[in-house]
Image: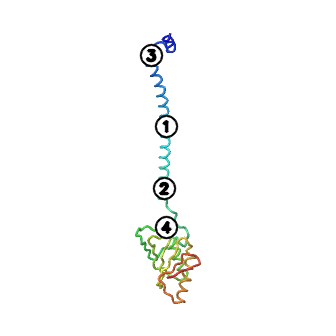
């Protein structure tokens, strides 16, 4: 009787080995589906990351190549820098912002009766400039983040003060508004 009950559960013409292959193939199909789903998810993530990296590279490249608009202020646009500009880093690339600041400062100092003979971009100082004034021993440390007109007024006041007191410092620091330091 035992053999007869096994035959009833098995389909006609089916062997025990065929039953195992059938079970294995279903579990293999499930695993194959999971792998395919993982591959699809991974592919989507990789494509998304690649697009993100390409977009970031494009953005940084465009930002690097961006041309800053020319200064349209009629006083500065026509004014050429007359002073010698020395780059201590010797990179040879002075930004348009620094050039515009030098032009503004030189013009403002000229309006106050002082002549700039040399502007130095010191090594390691990204926002500082050293300005040499004609007829003065000291050079002036200035900050390009300050307004050029205000800086010019501070330089003019300090040059008068040094002349009145007959002081001969090595340099005068006018990078802080309302204060001046000399050494």
In the rendered image, residue 74, in percent from the top left (x then y), is placed at 55, 71
Applied colour scheme: rainbow
The CA distance from mark 4 to mark 3 is 86 Å
Q: Are marks 3 and 1 in contact (CB under 8 Å)?
A: no
Residue tagged 1: 38
Residue 92 got which mark?
A: none
The CA distance from mark 3 to mark 1 is 35 Å
Residue at the (45%, 70%) spot, across then down: 124
The CA distance from mark 1 to mark 2 is 33 Å
Residue in front for this viewpoint, 72 or 109: 109
Residue tagged 3: 15
Sequence-wise, the earlier of marks 1 and 4 is 1
Which residue appears farthest toward the front when viewing the image? 1
Residue tagged 2: 60
Q: Secondary structure at mark 1?
A: helix
For the residue carrying disc 3, how many other residues have a C-alpha within 10 Å: few (<14), some (14-19), or many (20+)? few
């Amino acid at each position: 009787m035992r053999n007869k009950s096994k035959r009833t559960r098995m389909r006609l013409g089916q062997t025990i080995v065929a039953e195992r292959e059938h079970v294995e193939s279903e579990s293999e199909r499930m695993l194959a589906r999971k792998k395919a789903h993982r591959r699809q998810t991974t592919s989507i993530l990789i494509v998304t990351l690649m697009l993100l990296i390409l977009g970031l590279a494009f953005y940084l490249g465009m930002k690097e190549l961006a041309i800053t608009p020319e200064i349209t202020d009629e006083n500065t646009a026509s004014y050429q820098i007359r002073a010698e500009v020395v780059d201590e880093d010797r990179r040879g690339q002075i930004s348009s912002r620094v050039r515009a600041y030098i032009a503004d400062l030189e013009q403002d100092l000229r309006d106050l009766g002082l002549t700039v003979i040399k502007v130095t971009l010191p090594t390691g100082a990204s926002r500082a400039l050293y300005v040499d004034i004609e007829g003065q021993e000291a050079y002036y440390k200035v900050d390009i983040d300050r307004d050029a007109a205000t800086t010019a007024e501070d330089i003019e006041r300090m040059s008068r003060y040094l002349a009145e007191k007959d002081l001969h410092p090595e340099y005068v620091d006018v990078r802080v508004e309302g204060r001046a330091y000399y050494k």
